[in-house]
Amino acid sequence: MDIAPGQPVIEVKDLKKSYESPAGATEVLHGLNFQIRAGEFVAVMGPSGSGKSTMMNILGCLDTPTSGRFAIAGQAAAKLDGDALAKLRNDTIGFVFQGFNLLARTTIEDNVALPLVYRGQGAVERRAAARAILAKVGLEGYAKSRPSQISGGQQQRVAIARALVGKPTIVFADEPTGNLDTKTSDEIMELFAALNREDKITLMIVTHEPHIAQYADRLIRIVDGLIDYDGPARDYFTERAA
């Protein structure tokens, strides 16, 4: 789904999330308000338990809020049933996870093409799209390899290609460099930055690492379920370095 640069891709209004336990309800998100606009590169930081991954799971339609509302590409998620949410997720959102989540016995090409299977695209079209996006992430020639035959950094590039193959409106990445060494982490973040800069892909990356967050243009910092900072990433880190 194409959205004009600067238009809202994600709109969040007073978003709250609680979990029930024998001791009672524990509120993890206390009322978040923000927008993500087309073409932005946003990092989400916060200490463990701050609610950043919970928020991303909600925005990715993998979880539901306790109250508040959010819209993706203009569609109010609360008004959609399970099937409609699944379609929105598959058509609009790309996911990159810390653990790669590749199918071990499946070729790289077929791993990348998997989201297109759920869209009902034919095999020839799927494979052409997969090979094109593999070339974009620097993995030409690896289409018939399997995940065990490539490095961790290359596996994460495959995961990024899979997230992009369906031309999503926004890509969510949850700790995408968490399993990688520093050099490979930088290579992955440089790839994300290039995709945002050159292809105008909208990105939201959750990380606990300041050096990873500095690749983004905008930083949202969540502390104890509340937004502690929302502004230019460069300004945040410059102020703290002074």
Image (cartoon, rainbow, N blue to C red):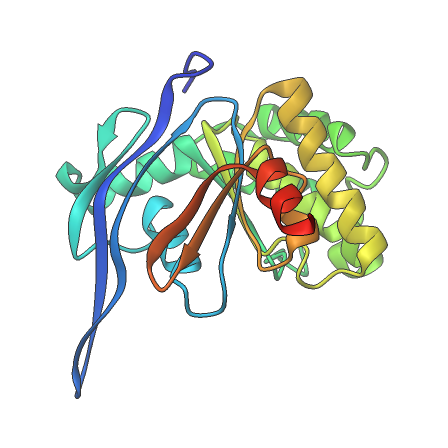
Looking at the picture, does residue 26 appear above or below residue 219?
below
Give 50 or 194, whichever is nearer the viewer: 50
Instruction: From the top left corner, tell me how far across and down residue 108 is, in percent.
Output: 71, 46
Q: Residue at x 23, y 48 (%)?
A: 15
Farthest top residue in view: 4
Total marks shown come to 0
Give 137 or 18, whichever is nearer the viewer: 18
Give 14 or 65, whichever is nearer the viewer: 14
Left or right position of 202 against 225: right
Q: Residue at x 61, y 62 (%)?
A: 99
Q: Residue at x 17, y 57 (%)?
A: 66
Quadrant housing the N terminus: top left
Left or right position of 38 against 22: right
Q: Residue at x 75, y 37 (%)?
A: 190
Instruction: From the top left corner, tell me how far across and down residue 163 is, in percent.
Output: 56, 39
Farthest bottom residue in view: 22
Give 156 or 218, whichever is nearer the viewer: 218
Looking at the picture, does residue 149 appear above or below residue 122?
below
Residue 193 visible in image = yes
Instruction: From the top left corner, tell me how far across and down residue 150 is, in percent.
Output: 83, 54
Residue 150 visible in image = no
Instruction: From the top left corner, tell me how far across and down residue 54 is, in percent.
Output: 37, 59
Left or right position of 236 against 54: right
